[in-house]
Amino acid sequence: MLLFIKTFLILLLCCGVMITASATESAVVFEYEWDAYYSNVSWVKGLDDQNIPVVKNLKELDIYKEVLSKSLKPDFIVFEASVNPLPLLGVYLREKNQSLYKNGSSRGFDGKVLESVTTGFEEPYALSFFAGRVLRFAPPQGMQTQGDDKGYIGYLLSVGTHHIQQNVLIRDNWVELEWKIKGQRETDAQHLSWSFRGGAKFHSHPEISNSFMLGLRRNRIDFQEAKYAFMRNIGFEYRLDVLQKNLKPSKQTLIVDKHWPLYQGKRTVSLGLGLIWQGPNRYLGNLAKTQEKWSVVFRPNIKF
């Protein structure tokens, strides 16, 4: 139990930072985002050295329409390097504390808690190349922007060299191809982010099945409409993976996030709860012997 308490405190402290920033100079934009679960640095470049176009006075539904209405002919490219800190911490803690697991595979209570906080990310890091359209959202009149207010639509290629299964790092050269819409808009009144994507993932490891994927994610935090704050300050993420060989479901993920704004929107405490289901053929051979059909997701975070 003492080990569980120490582990939980370490994870909670590591969950405590999410910072976004960007440096803009004409058509080139350098950006970084520090988050307990997904941190990245990126470089955005216009193909013809054009500046990122700015759109104004759009409500949430209008933002989606505006992004979708743009041609899929790429005019911007983005290079990104990303790392998943807490999933990597989970790998480290399991490796250094084998007592969390009984008989080398089945989880004790502490192991279950560790996995519930760190699960949901299958790779420790990735390199990505995006080609598509980029839009910048101007803040509504009388409001100030607080973050990276941009939308993206286009094609994404991601590669990596390892896979994470139950906090165990496995050598696996993987490639993922996606069509993706993503973006975020952050003002002093509201933080809104979204991601819609579909694609395919290929693995070099013979015991990890190739899959097709469809994913949806939306988060919204309102700081000024207290009457509807409970329902507005909720986000969700859903992802469906199906096997490429027979199109049968191999994995489903559902996570619901609740946000509590603090300090006039300068800080937000979040808690994500969810479930992950894995089908019998997602993993093969020796990897299939250790997989769990159901996993609980417990994801605390603080955003600055």
Image (cartoon, rainbow, N blue to C red):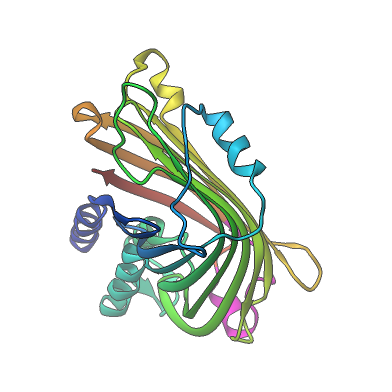
**Highlighted magenta segment, given as a residue range:** 277-291
Position in image of residue 61 (x %, y %) = 58, 30
Residue in front for this viewpoint, 88 or 102: 88
State the count of labels.
0
Picture quadrant where residue 213 is located = bottom right
Give the answer, above or below, for where 109 lies relative to 289. above
In the displayed structure image, the side of residue 24 where residue 137 appears, left or right: right
Q: Tell me, yes or no, if residue 191 can be seen here.
A: no
Residue farthest toward the right in the current orientation of the protein: 246
Residue 246 position by quadrant: bottom right
Q: Residue furthest top?
A: 227
* Front residue (pair 103, 216): 216
Q: Residue at x 43, y 61 (%)?
A: 119
State the image coordinates of residue 172 (x, y, percent, origin top left): 52, 84
Seen at 56% across and 60% down, the residue is 75
Above-or-below relation of 190 to 182 = above
* 183 relative to 286 in the view: left or right: left
Judging depth in this view, the residue of 167 and 85 nearest the camera is 85
Question: For residue 73, what is the image quadrant?
Answer: bottom right
Residue 120: in sight, yes or no? Answer: yes
| Residue 232 in picture, x, y percent from top left | 44, 25
Q: How far across and how far down the image is residue 133, in percent?
A: 56, 54
Residue 279 covered by magenta stretch: yes
- The image shows residue 184, relative to residue 282, as above or below, that is above
Magenta span contains residue 171:
no
Screen quadrant of the N terminus: bottom left
Viewer-closest of 23 and 126: 23
Q: Is residue 94 left or right of residue 2?
A: right
* Quadrant that contains the C terminus: top left
Q: Looking at the image, which residue is at 48% across and 45% down?
A: 53
